[in-house]
């Protein structure tokens, strides 16, 4: 971090487009307002997946809409503030559109970062840890190159509509329907973090996916953070160079 007044911001699970584009529009406006505020002291911004309830990149087509949030991200990135995007289980079919159009790198797996001597392991969180075997099998199908090739042959008007139906109505693309706290011993991401700590130290594990704001102390030097969502909680994370805090917008 280059300045003591600068901060690292984290947000996840906006699910723009759900249950309909019209219904999610006020949430998009609220998220854009948040971006407009944090840009003034942001050292970097991390978006941890499911920004969209569905996203697929054809060779020359992406889903229409979301121009306000895309425009705001472009503005912030063009100003020199780094933005990092981790795909979630609803926008896992991202390819290079963000990289080429917005200069925002896209990560499909967890990644380590270090800020002010603090180590972070960051990702969306889907498919990590024990359990959730049904979703893990489904994710292998969705991310298979042949599956994406077959889907790309559907006309976008058909493919996008079908995927939105599955995502919103049947939750087939979602690996997590239950947003209730399951208990530390049953939270798969907590178990994943504890397993990672057996081989390497991290100060913070930061994930989304669960739609539930959580701060769980793993040991005297490590903490698990779940960012919540922008559907019911409107929570986000901020690291000021010394400590990490969950806040509500």
Image (tube, rainbow, N blue to C red):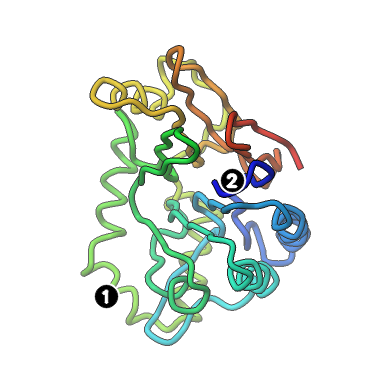
Left or right, 32 with respect to 100, comes to: right
- Which quadrant of the figure has residue 243? top right
Q: Earlier in the sequence, mark 1 or mark 2?
A: 2
> Which residue is outermost to the top?
220
Q: State the residue in front, 16 or 99.
A: 99
Checking the image for residue 149, the label placed there is 1
Q: Residue furthest bottom?
A: 60
**Which residue is painted at 51% across and 41% down in the image?**
208
Eyeballing the image, is 120 above or below 63? Answer: above
Mark closer to the observer (1, 2)? 2
Distance Cα–Cα, label 1 vs label 2? 37 Å
- Could you tell me residue 4's position as x and y percent? 64, 41
Side of 60 relative to 69 (left or right): left
Residue bearing mark 2: 8
Residue at image position (64%, 66%) is: 76
Q: Is residue 103 above or below residue 59?
A: above
């Amino acid at each position: 971090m280059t300045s003591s007044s600068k901060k690292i911001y984290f947000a996840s699970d906006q699910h723009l487009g759900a249950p309909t584009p019209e219904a999610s529009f006020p949430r998009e406006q609220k998220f854009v307002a948040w971006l407009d505020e944090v840009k003034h002291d942001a050292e970097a911004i991390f978006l941890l997946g499911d920004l969209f309830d569905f996203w697929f990149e054809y060779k020359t087509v992406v889903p229409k809409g979301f121009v306000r949030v895309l425009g705001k991200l472009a503005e912030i990135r063009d100003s020199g503030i780094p933005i990092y995007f981790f795909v979630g289980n609803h926008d896992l079919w991202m390819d290079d559109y963000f990289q080429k159009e917005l200069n925002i790198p896209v990560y499909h797996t967890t990644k380590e970062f270090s800020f002010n001597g603090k180590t972070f392991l960051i990702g969306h969180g889907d498919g990590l840890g024990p359990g959730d075997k049904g979703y893990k099998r489904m994710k292998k199908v969705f991310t298979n190159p042949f599956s994406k090739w077959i889907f790309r042959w559907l006309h976008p008007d058909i493919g996008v509509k079908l995927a939105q139906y599955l995502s919103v109505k049947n939750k087939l693309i979602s690996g997590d329907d239950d947003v209730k706290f399951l208990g530390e011993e049953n939270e798969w991401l907590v178990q994943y973090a504890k397993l990672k700590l057996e081989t390497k130290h991290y100060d913070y594990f930061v994930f989304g996916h669960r739609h539930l704001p959580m701060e769980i102390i793993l040991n005297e030097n490590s903490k698990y953070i779940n960012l919540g969502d922008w559907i019911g909680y409107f929570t986000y994370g901020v690291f000021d160079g010394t400590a990490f805090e969950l806040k509500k917008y």
